[in-house]
Amino acid sequence: MSSGTVQLRAVTRRFSLGATSVTALDRVSLTFPRATFTAVMGPSGSGKSTLLQCAAGLDRSTSGSVTLGGTELTDLSETELTLLRRERIGFVFQAFNLLPSLTAEQNVALPLRLAGRRPSKARVREVLEQVGLGDRARHRPTELSGGQQQRVALARALITRPEVLFGDEPTGALDSRTSREVLDLLRAMVDREGRTVVMVTHDPVAASYADRAVFLVDGRVNGELTGAGAEDIAARMTRLETAPC
Ligand SMILES: Nc1ncnc2c1ncn2[C@@H]1O[C@H](COP(=O)(O)OP(=O)(O)OP(=O)(O)O)[C@@H](O)[C@H]1O
C-alpha cells in the first residue's frame, strides 16, 4: 500500500450510552488514495466526524481495519498512535485552536517542539510563506483575521510534512472569500506536494474543490460523486436530507 493512502475496511464504531448503544459507523469501507482530495459529506449525525476521527487515529473503531500506508492503526499502542499522528498526519479543525499568547511562527513551530525537535527558523518561514503569511510571522492570533488564523493552523499542520491532512469543517467559520483561499491551499497541497487531503464539510462549494465527495447516511457509505460541481453536490445533499428514513 502506497504511503499516504488511507484505507478503512469494514470499520464499525459503536458508542455505549448506558443500556443502549449508537452505531455511528456501520461497516464502512473506503480508500483515500495518496495525492487525492476527498470531501466527506452527509446529514447531521451521519457519522462524518467519527469517520474522520477513526481514520486519523484520534479514536479507535469498535471493529474493522484502518491502515495508513502499510501501518495498521488498530494494532498500535497509544504511544505508537500518538507518534504516528505527530509524524505522519496533520489536522485542521473549524476552531483554529491557536494559542493566543504565541505568535504565528511560535504556533507553527509548536508541533515540532512538542516532538522534542528544534524547529528551524527557515522551515517555519517556509510554511508560513506557503500559506501566504510570510509577513505575519510575529503577529498574535488576535491580530489576524479568521482566514489568516486558519492559514496559520494550516501551516502548523504542514510543518511536519504529513502524508495526510484531515480537516473537520476547516472552512466552517470563514466567509466565502477566505474559505476559497484556504480551499485553494488545500488543493495545492494535493496537486503540488502529493499530500492526501480528507475534509468533512457541509458546504457543497467547499466539496467541489475535492476530487470526489463521499456521502454518509446513518453511518454507512451512500454513494459518491467524482469531479462534481457545487450544484450537483448540493442536489445530492438535498435528496439525502429529505429522503424518508
Ligand atoms: N462520544 C460519543 N458518544 C456517544 N455518541 C456519539 C459520540 N460521538 C458521536 N456520537 C453519535 O454518533 C453519531 C454520529 O456522530 P458524528 O458526530 O460522527 O456525526 P456528524 O455527521 O459529524 O454530525 P454533524 O454534521 O452534526 O457534526 C451521532 O448519532 C452522535 O450522536
Image (cartoon, rainbow, N blue to C red):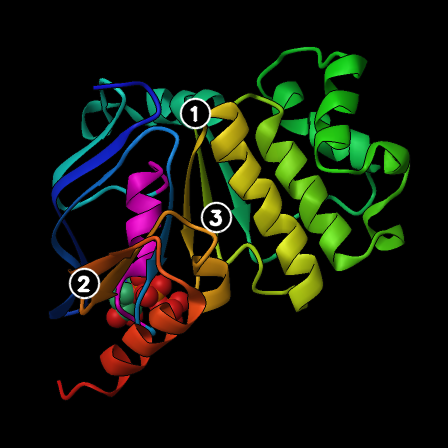
Q: Which residues are magenta?
A: 45-58
Residue located 48% across and 48% down the image: 167
| Label 2 secondary element | loop
- Label 2 residue near ligand 1, CB within 8 Å: yes
Quarter of the image that includes the N terminus:
top left
Which one is in front, 28 or 180?
180
Asked where in the image residue 41 lies, by quadrant, the reply is bottom left
Residues under labels 2 and 1: Cα distance? 26 Å
Residue located 83% across and 43% down the image: 101
Three-letter code, disc 3: Gly
Report which residue position mark 1 lands on: 163
Foreground tag (2 vs 1): 1
Upstream in sequence: badge 2 or badge 1: 1
What is the x, y in percent for residue 117? 64, 11
Residue located 56% across and 64% down the image: 172
| Label 1 secondary element | loop
Left or right of residue 73, residue 136 in this image: right
Residues under labels 2 and 3: Cα distance? 19 Å
Asked where in the image residue 18 lies, by quadrant, the reply is bottom left
Upstream in sequence: badge 2 or badge 3: 3
